Image: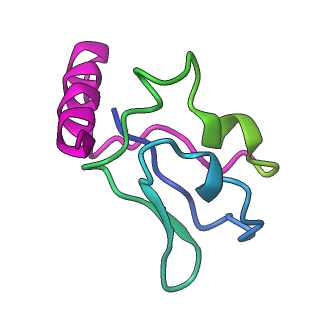
């Protein structure tokens, strides 16, 4: 499943640059994750990098965007194909 950033986010700016899919951006109040781009770092890393660096542990799984590991891998492959020159 995709990840979500909770309203306990302190806008520390460490999650956005570590996201390999550029799924994280600054929202109106705090950072947000685009579920269409989030693969939980499947295809890139063993663990979601935003979760690894978040100092306030405010990035859980998003229950509204449940995806299996296989679905996340397919999304990763699709995103990489779109990004290829």
| Visual colour scheme | rainbow
Report the quarter where the C terminus lies: top left
Report the quarter where the N terminus lies: top left
Q: Nearer the viewer, residue 83 or 67?
A: 83
Q: Nearer the viewer, residue 82 or 85?
A: 85
Is residue 49 depicted above or below 35 in this figure?
above
Relative side of 24 to 75, left or right? right
Relative side of 10 to 4, left or right? right
Q: Nearer the viewer, residue 48 or 22?
A: 22
Where is residue 84? Give x, y as percent: 24, 39
Direction bottom: furthest residue:
28
Where is residue 58? Give x, y as percent: 65, 51
Relative side of 57 to 83, left or right? right
- Quadrant of the rendered structure where residue 14 is? bottom right
- Quadrant of the rendered structure where residue 77 is? top left
Please count the marks in the image. Answer: 0
Where is residue 26? Give x, y as percent: 53, 74
Direction front: furthest residue:
85
Question: Residue visible at 27% across and 34% down?
Answer: 80
Is residue 73 located in the magenta-colored stretch of the structure? yes
Direction right: furthest residue:
55
Question: Residue visible at 42% across and 45% down?
Answer: 21
- Quadrant of the rendered structure where residue 30 is? bottom right
Relative side of 57 to 23, left or right? right
Where is residue 33? Give x, y as percent: 43, 57
Q: Nearer the viewer, residue 26 or 76?
A: 76
Is residue 54 depicted above or below 72 in this figure?
below
Is residue 83 depicted above or below 8 in this figure?
above
Range drawn in magenta: 57-85
Is residue 5 located in the magenta-colored stretch of the structure? no
Question: Residue visible at 44% across and 54% down?
Answer: 22
């Amino acid at each position: 499943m995709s990840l979500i950033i909770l309203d306990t986010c302190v806008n520390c700016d460490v999650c956005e640059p570590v996201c390999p899919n550029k799924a994280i951006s600054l929202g109106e109040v705090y950072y947000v994750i685009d579920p269409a781009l989030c693969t939980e770092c499947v295809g890139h890393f063993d663990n979601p990098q935003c979760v690894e660096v978040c100092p306030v542990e405010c990035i859980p799984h998003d229950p509204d965007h449940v995806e299996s590991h296989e679905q996340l891998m397919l999304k990763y492959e699709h995103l990489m194909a779109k990004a290829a020159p």
